[in-house]
């Protein structure tokens, strides 16, 4: 069974070429996120993949640091950034990021399609809170598959054994919200995109 880093390194090139399946929900997520950003703020994105979201939001922030566990994802993201000449955007592989940024560094942290891929969610949320300045905002969008755990659990287990899937935390909407609150955040907004069966979009403040 490959590590998550190995899985995403192998998947990176195919991932970079894959179109977004639900363009309308993606656009709504970006538009909604912009409401919580400042053109002078320093923003951190976790799980940035190949950088597409960071590149679309960069005009709404002062500076963005986008990170990912995959070295190959970051290589592709850096190539995009150079091509588009954004001086206020930097991409970093996650170990490098950990070494360079102290607590209270960011006005906002973004985590799209990320929290359900984290092995230790309480520890990750604690680190996110530490990175935020007082009054900082945490914006996330997370796939909550816990209500159908009986379906997804065995399927993901087999796919992981075959090297076809990363770790996935099968949590419910309520479990995700409880985890964010337990980390010391105040949830200020919750919605879903698409509305009936979409990922949970949550905005929280320190």
Image (cartoon, rainbow, N blue to C red):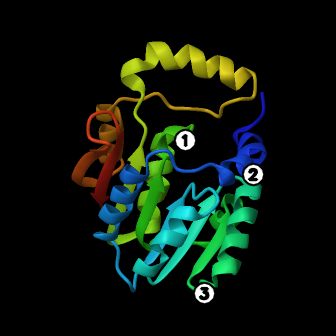
Mark 2 secondary-structure assignment: helix
Q: Is residue 41 left or right of residue 80?
A: left
Counting residues from the N terminus, which is met first, the one under dot 2 or under dot 3?
2
Q: Residues within 10 Å of mark 1 (few under 14, many from 20)?
A: some
The picture places residue 48, in percent across and down from the top left corner, at: 57, 59
Counting residues from the N terminus, which is met first, the one under dot 1 or under dot 2?
2
Tell me the mark number nearer the camera, choosing from 1 and 2: 2
Q: Is residue 167 above or below residue 34?
A: above
Front-most of residues 74 and 26: 26
Q: Is residue 92 left or right of residue 114?
A: right
* Residue denoted by label 3: 87
Mark 1 secondary-structure assignment: loop
The residue that appears at 58% across and 72% down in the rendered structure is: 101
Q: Is residue 177 above or below residue 74?
A: above
The dot on residue 118 is 1
The residue that appears at 50% across and 31% down in the rendered structure is: 169
Say which quadrant the C terminus sits in: bottom left
* Residue denoted by label 2: 13
């Amino acid at each position: 069974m490959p590590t998550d880093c190995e899985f995403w390194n192998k998947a990176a090139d195919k991932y970079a070429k894959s179109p977004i399946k639900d363009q309308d929900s993606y656009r709504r997520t970006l538009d909604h996120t912009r409401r919580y950003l400042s053109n002078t703020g320093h923003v951190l994105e976790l799980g940035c993949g190949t950088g597409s979201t960071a590149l679309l939001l960069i005009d709404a922030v002062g500076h963005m640091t986008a990170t990912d566990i995959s070295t190959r994802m970051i290589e592709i993201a850096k190539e995009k950034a150079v091509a588009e000449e954004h001086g206020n955007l930097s991409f970093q592989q996650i170990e490098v990021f950990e070494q360079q940024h102290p607590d209270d560094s960011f006005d906002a942290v973004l985590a799209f399609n990320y929290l359900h891929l984290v092995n230790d969610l309480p520890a990750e949320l604690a680190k996110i809170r530490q990175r935020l300045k007082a009054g900082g905002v945490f914006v996330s969008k997370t796939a909550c598959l816990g209500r159908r755990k009986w379906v997804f659990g065995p399927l993901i287990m087999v796919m992981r054994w075959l090297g076809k899937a990363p770790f996935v935390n099968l949590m419910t909407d309520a479990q995700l919200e409880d985890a964010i609150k337990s980390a010391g955040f105040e949830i200020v907004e919750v919605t879903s995109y698409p509305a009936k069966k979409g990922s949970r979009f949550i905005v929280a403040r320190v």
